[in-house]
Image (tube, rainbow, N blue to C red):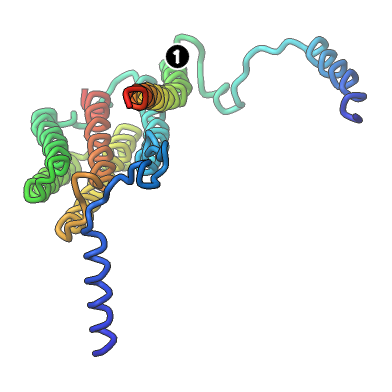
């Protein structure tokens, strides 16, 4: 009950925090900022490529495992339904 | 002595019990109408999938570091350092992929309950994996003589770390195959129950596929 009473205040504070937040440009850490020259710098290209690769990997892996599990369970469910249908037909024939 | 006799008797009893063929109890004989089905994915398969995801993230970290240096360098290999040997590594790659083929053949053998072929193909895989690691070691010795060491900048550092970690994985997988071979020699695997062989084959194929990616990335 207490949660319901404080919910509007929490929502209001969150909305204000989001609305009043100052815009900030994307920033790297101090080390990266000094080491990397800019868009044309080879090191900057290297870091960007690496970031993209590392960012994609979890999606690729979880997508692959999730897809495999979905396929296996979907295939298994189809087989189970087929067996149940066969069983019902046999029962009907008896 | 009496204890050993008792153990032998108990062992015979268990063996006989295990040898009794399993039979489905029909509902008319008091069996369940809908017997519980086996899970669609075995625990062993789930475990190896999780392990391979973890391994992939580990290698992704190493490849990410390699990409920073490789893409971030103006010249690769840096001046004064030797290029990596392509010819002998191609030969080595073919050997490793052939070992993947023998592992698949081993899995097919146990699926038709051919124990002798299972052991023979596992031995072939260990031998091919051993030749792969051996040739790679010899190449490393040559590269060190040509001045490429772990401390020769990012080029040497990333090469030895990435390829060395893979070689360590191949060596670990070979130990695993030897363990499976021991279990196969004791007749542990059957046509119905061979999860141990299956996960080992999956891991070996993963190591082979990973080598394909690393070879394309690092040696070209």
Q: Residue, x 21% and y 56% (percent of image)?
A: B188
The number of discs equals 1
Q: Nearer the viewer, residue A19 or B207?
A: B207
B40 vs B24: above or below: above
Counting from the top left corner in percent of width and height, residue B147 is at 21, 40
B16 vs B72: above or below: below
Counting from the top left corner in percent of width and height, residue B96 is at 14, 36
Q: Nearer the viewer, residue A29 or A94?
A: A94
Q: Residue, x 28% and y 42% (percent of image)?
A: B199
Q: Is residue A88 left or right of residue B166?
A: right
B6 vs A25: above or below: below
For numbered disc 1, what is the local secondary structure?
loop
Q: Nearer the viewer, residue B171 or B6?
A: B6
Residue furthest out toward the front: A94
B186 vs B12: above or below: above
Per the image, the residue denoted by label 1 is A41
- Which quarter of the image is occupied by the C terminus of chain A? top left
Q: Residue, x 87% and y 28% (percent of image)?
A: A3
Q: Residue, x 23% and y 48% (percent of image)?
A: B171
Q: Quadrant of residue A22?
A: top right
Q: Is residue B19 left or right of residue B45?
A: left
Q: Quadrant of residue B211?
A: top left
Q: Nearer the viewer, residue B85 or B42?
A: B42
Residue B187 seen in render: yes
- Which quarter of the image is occupied by the N terminus of chain A? top right
> Callout 1: residue from which chain?
A
Q: Is residue B100 left or right of residue A47?
A: left
Disc 1: CA contacts within 10 A as few (<14), some (14-19) or many (>=20): some
């Amino acid at each position: 009950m207490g949660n319901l009473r404080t919910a509007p205040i929490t929502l209001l504070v969150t909305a204000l925090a989001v609305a009043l937040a100052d815009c900030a440009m994307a920033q790297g850490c101090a080390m990266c900022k000094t080491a990397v020259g800019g868009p044309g710098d080879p090191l900057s290209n290297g870091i960007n490529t690496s970031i993209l690769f590392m960012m994609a990997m979890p999606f690729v892996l979880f997508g692959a495992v999730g897809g495999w599990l979905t396929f296996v369970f979907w295939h298994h469910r189809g087989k189970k339904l087929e067996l149940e249908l066969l069983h019902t037909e046999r029962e009907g024939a008896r | 002595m009496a204890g050993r006799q008792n153990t032998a008797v108990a062992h015979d009893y268990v063996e006989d019990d295990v040898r009794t063929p399993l039979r489905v109890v029909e509902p008319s004989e008091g069996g369940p109408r809908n017997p519980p089905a086996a899970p669609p994915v075995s625990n062993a398969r789930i475990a190896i999938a999780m392990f391979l995801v973890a391994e992939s993230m580990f290698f992704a970290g190493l490849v990410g570091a390699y990409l920073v240096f490789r893409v971030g360098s103006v010249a690769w290999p840096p001046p004064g350092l030797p290029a990596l040997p392509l010819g002998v590594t191609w030969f080595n790659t073919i050997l490793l992929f052939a070992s993947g083929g023998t592992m698949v053949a081993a899995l097919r053998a146990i699926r038709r309950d051919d124990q002798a072929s299972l052991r023979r193909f596992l031995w072939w895989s260990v031998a091919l994996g051993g030749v792969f690691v051996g040739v790679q070691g010899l190449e490393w010795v040559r590269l060190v003589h040509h001045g490429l060491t772990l401390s020769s900048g990012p080029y040497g550092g990333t090469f030895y770390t990435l390829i060395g970690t893979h070689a360590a994985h191949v060596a670990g997988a070979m130990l695993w195959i030897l363990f499976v071979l021991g279990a196969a020699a004791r007749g542990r695997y059957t046509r119905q129950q061979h999860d141990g062989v299956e996960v080992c084959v999956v891991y070996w194929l993963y190591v082979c596929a990973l080598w394909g990616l690393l070879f394309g990335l690092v040696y070209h």
